[in-house]
Structures are given as structure tokens and as C-alpha cells.
Image (cartoon, rainbow, N blue to C red):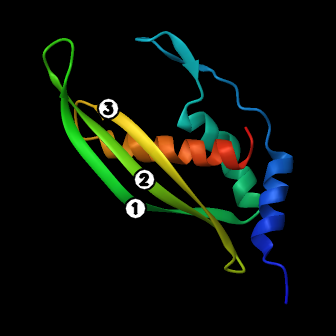
């Protein structure tokens, strides 16, 4: 029986992955962070070279409206997302991550999924 390729391909991705600095700044709370765009831009070509792709599946989510300090409303979203890392032989590994977000419009789920993906990648690849 052959060893599933996903293990060697993820190991190869780890070998190629460099540190991703905290170059984005949250203006409201004044802290630095790694944005999802920074993480995805750094990893896209590495994943493509190693023929690994990611399939997301939202397992559960909740939304609730919460008042803001200024008297408005924002929607809080928490999503539990299963990410399947697959390669061309059909082998895969999965992570399950929770993402949380606040948004005043319709982007709460997108933000929550982005956070869940970011932490899946950061934790899996030890970034």
C-alpha cells in the first residue's frame, strides 16, 4: 500500500514556508496582525507547486446582532469550518477551526471564514 501523498506534500510546503510578519495594523485597538491576504499571498504559489488545494465546509455558524458603543448595531458571526487539504492522489488531512467576526453589513460570514482559514494555515504550518 502506497503512502498517501498529502503527508509528503504538506511537509514540502512547510519546508518552503517562511515567516509571515505582522504587517497590518488595527487602528481601533492599535495592534499589529497578519492579514489573511498576507497569508494567502505568501502560500498560494507554494501550495500550487506542491499540488495541494483546500476545500472549506462550514459545519456550524451562529449570528447575533449586538449594539455598538455609538448606538448602532453590528452582527457577530461565529463559524466552525472544516478545511480539507487535498492533493492529486485523493489523499487528504483535515483541520477544524473556529472563526469569529463583527460586521455592520453582509460580510460577517466571509470574515469569520477568513479567520478560520488563517488560523488553520498558521497552526498547520507552524507560522
Residue 59's tag is 1
Q: Earlier in the sequence, mark 3 or mark 1?
A: 1
Vertical order, 115 against 97 (above or below):
above
Q: What kind of element bears circle 3?
A: strand
The residue carrying mark 3 is 102
Residue reaching furthest to the left: 71
Image location (x, y in percent) of residue 120:
60, 48
Residue at point 62%, 20% (across, down): 23
Work out whether residue 12 or residue 2 is closer to the camera in this orientation and state it.
Answer: 2
Quick check: 39 above or below 25? below
* Near-viewer residue (48 or 66): 66
83 in relation to 72, above or below: below
Percent position of residue 53, x then y: 63, 63
Residue sitting at x 80%, y 37%: 18
Question: Of label 1 and label 2, which has the lower sequence position?
Answer: 1
Task: Kindly identify the residue that appears in the image at 66 percent across and 50 percent down.
Answer: 44
Q: Position of residue 84 (x, y in %)?
A: 58, 65
Instruction: Identify the element where label 2 is drawn.
Output: strand
Q: Residue furthest bottom?
A: 1
Question: Considering only order in the chain, which callout, 3 or 2, is on the residue closer to the N terminus?
Answer: 2
Q: Which residue is mark 2?
A: 80
In the image, which is nearer the foreground, mark 2 or mark 3? 2
**In the rendered image, which quarter contains the C terminus?**
top right
Q: CA distance from mark 3 to mark 1?
A: 19 Å
Tag 1–tag 2 contact (CB < 8 Å):
yes
Local SS, label 1: strand
Q: Quadrant of residue 51?
A: bottom right
What's the CA distance linking mark 1 and mark 2?
A: 6 Å
Amino acid at each position: 500500500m502506497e503512502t498517501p501523498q498529502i503527508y509528503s506534500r504538506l511537509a514540502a510546503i512547510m519546508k518552503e514556508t517562511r515567516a509571515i510578519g505582522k504587517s497590518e495594523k488595527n487602528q481601533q485597538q492599535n495592534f499589529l496582525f497578519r492579514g489573511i491576504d498576507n497569508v494567502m499571498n505568501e502560500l498560494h504559489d507554494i501550495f500550487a507547486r506542491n499540488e495541494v488545494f483546500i476545500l472549506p465546509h462550514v459545519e456550524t455558524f451562529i449570528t447575533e446582532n449586538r449594539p455598538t458603543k455609538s448606538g448602532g448595531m453590528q452582527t457577530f458571526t461565529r463559524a466552525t469550518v472544516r478545511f480539507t487539504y487535498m492533493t492529486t492522489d485523493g489523499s487528504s488531512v483535515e483541520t477544524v477551526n473556529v472563526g469569529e467576526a463583527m460586521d455592520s453589513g453582509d460580510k460577517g460570514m466571509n470574515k469569520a471564514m477568513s479567520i478560520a482559514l488563517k488560523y488553520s494555515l498558521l497552526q498547520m504550518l507552524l507560522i
